[in-house]
Amino acid sequence: MPETGLEPLNGHSLMMLPLTLLAILVAAAFGFTAWKTREIERQFPQHGELTDIGGYRINALHLPGPPDAALPPIVFIHGASGNLRDQETAFRGALEGRAELLFVDRPGHGYSQRGGPENDFPEGQAAAISRLMELKGIDRAIIVGHSFGGAIAASFAVFHPEKTAGLLFLAPATHPWPGGVDWHYTVAAAPYLGWWFTRLVSLPAGLVLIDGATKSVFSPNRRRDRYVDEGAPALVLRPENFRNNAIDVANLHDYVTRIAPRYREITAPTVIITGDSDPIVLEEIHSEGLARDIAGSELIRIHGLGHKPDYVVTDVAIAAIEKIAGMDRDLQALAHQAETRLSQSGISAQTAIGMAIERK
């Protein structure tokens, strides 16, 4: 046999080869996640001001109102997988200059720090927002909660009624539902395994799925053309943000099972806006449940509307805020007008990684 100068692979070397390849793949995945996290933060830098609320800092965009504001202060609470840009993009243009506005990154989302384990539940996050309001000089406000933010808005009204001038729920998630949550929430929320999952899998997978996922959240309506750029949903793909989001959602069912009976204590003026075509939450459970539990509340159900009333029927949501503030508004008539103009996208109501709440 001719001399090649190469040693033949022995059994030990052959056994080590798969482990070496695995180590290389893991290191590459870690490196990609770290690099892409920095790229996402460069694309969507901190927007707002960090405020220490007692051991950790909350990021929020605070827009003072005019001396003769037509509306009371309004606090906006984003949903799962979101950040303050989501609600700011929907409402700032129409409401700036009419009221004092506070758009909040919930604890552990956007650029807010997570804080303690109490913030794994809506009650703790409501307390964080209450403290932030105090530090911003806001005594009472209309609380607007979208999707998961609805659970926090309801908890805020239960535990901080003196600060609740009114409530607007937009496609809320507030009551126990049949089934569970999507598998990736369970995995990402798990001790140890979740740490690995969020650093090896969720970010690259999320980048592939984010366009379709955001379209499906809006479905059957059309997604806002620049939503991925303006709403910055990619921020949730960063490992700690993704894990915090997963813990929030994984804990939600048991939390609302415990707290929903207390919604009957809520006395603030309340409007609930929901669609009958929501692919994310079951309106017949959550929105109808709130209408049943909160005396005097008004339920606005819009035919053909999906999970994003904040974007698709923004005018109805603003009219609801005005009605909560005491203005005369016929919300049912406005809802009927909205139904006639809804533009259906034809996108299948399928949800993707990091966006859904309920597994139906």
Image (cartoon, rainbow, N blue to C red):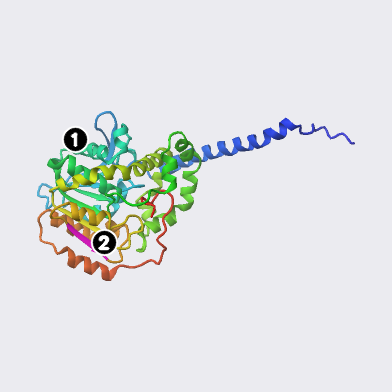
Which residue appears farthest toward the top when viewing the image? 55
In the rendered image, residue 219, in percent from the top left (x then y), is placed at 37, 61
In the picture of the structure, the residue carrying the numbered disc 1 is 135
Residue type highlighted by circle 2: Val
Residue type highlighted by circle 1: Leu
In the picture of the structure, the residue carrying the numbered disc 2 is 313
Q: Is residue 285 above or below residue 152?
A: below
In the rendered image, residue 167, in percent from the top left (x then y), is placed at 18, 50
What residue do we see at 18% from left, 44% from top? Answer: 157
Which residue appears farthest toward the right when viewing the image? 1
The Cα–Cα distance between marks 2 and 1, rounded to whole angstroms, is 32 Å
What residue do we see at 36% from left, 63% from top? Answer: 222
What residue do we see at 63% from left, 35% from top? Answer: 19
- Main SS, magenta residues: strand
Relative side of 307 to 6, left or right: left
Is there any visible trace of residue 160 in the rendered image? yes
How many marks overall?
A: 2
Q: Which residues are magenta?
A: 298-302
Is there any visible trace of residue 102 in the rendered image? no
Q: Quadrant of residue 41?
A: top left
Q: Quadrant of residue 275?
A: bottom left
- SS label for mark 2: loop
Relative side of 160 to 339, left or right: left
In the rendered image, residue 164, in percent from the top left (x then y), is placed at 15, 45
In the rendered image, residue 86, in percent from the top left (x then y), is placed at 31, 50
Q: Quadrant of the C terminus?
A: bottom left
